[in-house]
Amino acid sequence: DNEEYVHSRVIASIEINAAKDKVWDTLTDYDNLPTILPNLVLSQRIESQSRTTSLPGRVKLRQIVFKEFMYLRFRAEALLDVLEKPQNEIQFKLKTGTFDKLQGKFILQSCFDESQNEIEGRTSLVYAVEIRIPRGIQTFA
């Protein structure tokens, strides 16, 4: 952090009682992400005519987050470049938006028991994100 920005990095993981393909399908149903991610009010896949973004595994997303707490309101918008590595990883990086920097990834991994046997129908989801937010983008009601 400094006088201009709040800078954070977060890594979290959770084991989910669902197969990797189900978790993958949920995370890549971009238009419906607001139903599972708190504070995300819009997630919209942007169709592009660009050769780069029309390549397999490349997606553009427009997302809006909104959070209200007492008299504080926070709204941010982002256009993200997304790279899908099917069934394993989703990387995202800010192209334009309210934030100064936003990048991260979701990593899907199989779960194993003590004998190193894969546990069917169980997935480990790792989330890593780095964000740098300009100070003062919050507004008071």
Image (cartoon, grey):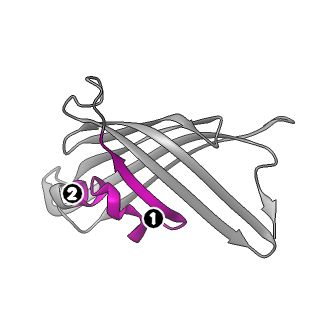
Q: Where the C terminus falls, by quadrant?
A: bottom right
Residue 115 rendering spot, x and y as whole percentages: 16, 53
For the point 24% across and 42% down, which residue is it? 88
The furthest residue to the right = 3
Q: CA distance from mark 1 to mark 2?
A: 15 Å
Q: Residue 113: name its quadrant.
A: bottom left
Residue 61 rendering spot, x and y as whole percentages: 40, 45
The furthest residue to the front = 49
Residue designated by label 2: 25
Q: Where the N terminus falls, by quadrant?
A: top right
Residue designated by label 1: 37
Q: How many marks?
A: 2
Residue segment shown in magenta? 23-47
Is 133 on the left or on the right of 35, as rendered? right
For the point 30% across and 35% down, which residue is it? 48
Residue 44 rendering spot, x and y as whole percentages: 38, 54
Q: Residue 20: name its quadrant.
A: bottom left
**Pointer 1: residues within 10 angstroms few (<14), some, or many (20+)?**
few
Is 110 on the left or on the right of 80, as rendered? left
For the point 61% across and 63% down, which residue is it? 66
Residue 27 falls within the magenta-colored stretch: yes
The furthest residue to the top = 51
- Depth order, front residue of 15/74: 74
Residue 73 shows in the view: yes
Residue 10 falls within the magenta-colored stretch: no
On residue 70, the disc is none
**Residue type at numbered disc 2:** Asp
Q: Residue 25: name its quadrant.
A: bottom left
**Pointer 2: residues within 10 angstroms few (<14), some, or many (20+)?**
few
**Residue type at numbered disc 1:** Leu
- Depth order, front residue of 48/97: 48
